[in-house]
Image (cartoon, grey):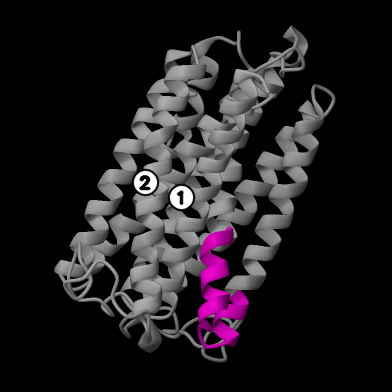
Amino acid sequence: MTRAALVRRFTFGAAAAVFVLLFAGALVTSTESGLAVPDWPLSYGKVMPPMVGGIRFEHGHRLVAAAVSTIVGLQIAVLLWGEKRKSVRRLGFLAFGAILLQALLGGLTVLLLLPPAVSTAHAALAEIVFALTAVVALQTSRLFVGDAALAPAPESLRPAAAAAFRAASVAAGVTYLQILLGAVMRHTGAGLAVADFPLVSGRLLPSLSLLGKPGVPIHLAHRLGAVAVLVAVAVAVRRLAALDGLHPVFAKLSAAWVALVTIQVMLGAMSIWSAKAPLVTAVHLATGALLWVTAVVACVLAAHAAKGTAAAEIAAPSPAPSALGATA
């Protein structure tokens, strides 16, 4: 096996491990096990407490976090050994720093008794870690390394590639904001502030009295955010269609993106209909993470295809998530 192949497999494994960590964290919040262990970094003063009740989820999440943090740290050594591009190495260091900060925020959520602001920041940073490791894996994949790597678009397609980049950037930004809204909703207990769907307490539009109830505004904002994501993804997929002839990855990415956003909407509805069944809400959160990373990957690929286009065309101010694509 070549050095490039080993790097490719390790970085893909690191990104997959971060996704597992996200799902483990989703199980903690979905089962309301965040304070099943009241101390940190130990659990009831032990390295391995009895794995019963909510401790299974909270301490299990800590064990997964320790393992994944180690993997992301080892990824730096792998990149230094087998990756010459400084930009990719920097992303590896950034991912490790981010996951260490993520661990610290995780500890603070417990020690401070789950304050919504800290818990939301913990969730928000988790998505950034996932995106960083996914971009590292993408940059070391066959799409960027080897004889069959994706080439920049010909001159005639570069304006279309730049347009696809802008649309993907908007979709990434909207998706990330929607994830933040979901985190705020989850950590403020507003997930069932409106207990029916697609109606709002039996009506098409909420009443003023309903809007005044705790949790309802953020819950409804999350529903509106889902509509915004649908529109943004639809526009981005349409823009990416112009690049289908450049490389098969664009058609495959678009199909996956449409499938994920469809599944995500269904899971959102099911989380309400099931009164927030733990497994349904955990899968909903995990699918949201995949939807976000798909948008980030689309940004990176479209930016690469648009290489050579005037910087002013594709480097206009944009949300922080899209910067990952531009940097990579």
Q: Residue at x 41, y 84 (%)?
A: 193
Q: Separation of disc 1 and disc 2 at Cα?
A: 23 Å
Kindly report which numbered mark, 1 or 2, lies closer to the viewer in this rendering: 2
Q: Residues within 10 Å of mark 2 (few under 14, many from 20)?
A: many
Q: Residue at x 71, y 23 (%)?
A: 160
- Is the magenta region chiefly helix, strand or loop? helix
Q: Residue at x 70, y 15 (%)?
A: 146
Residue carrying label 1: 176
Q: Name the residue at the bottom extreme.
A: 202
Relative to the observer, which residue lies in front, 318 or 85? 85
The earlier-in-sequence mark between 1 and 2 is 2
Start and end of the magenta stretch?
269-287
Q: Is residue 122 visible?
A: yes
Helix, strand or loop status at disc 1? helix
**In the drawing, what numbered circle is on residue 69?**
2
Q: Residue at x 38, y 65 (%)?
A: 61
On screen, 241 above or below 152? below
Q: Position of residue 291 (x, y in %)?
A: 59, 52
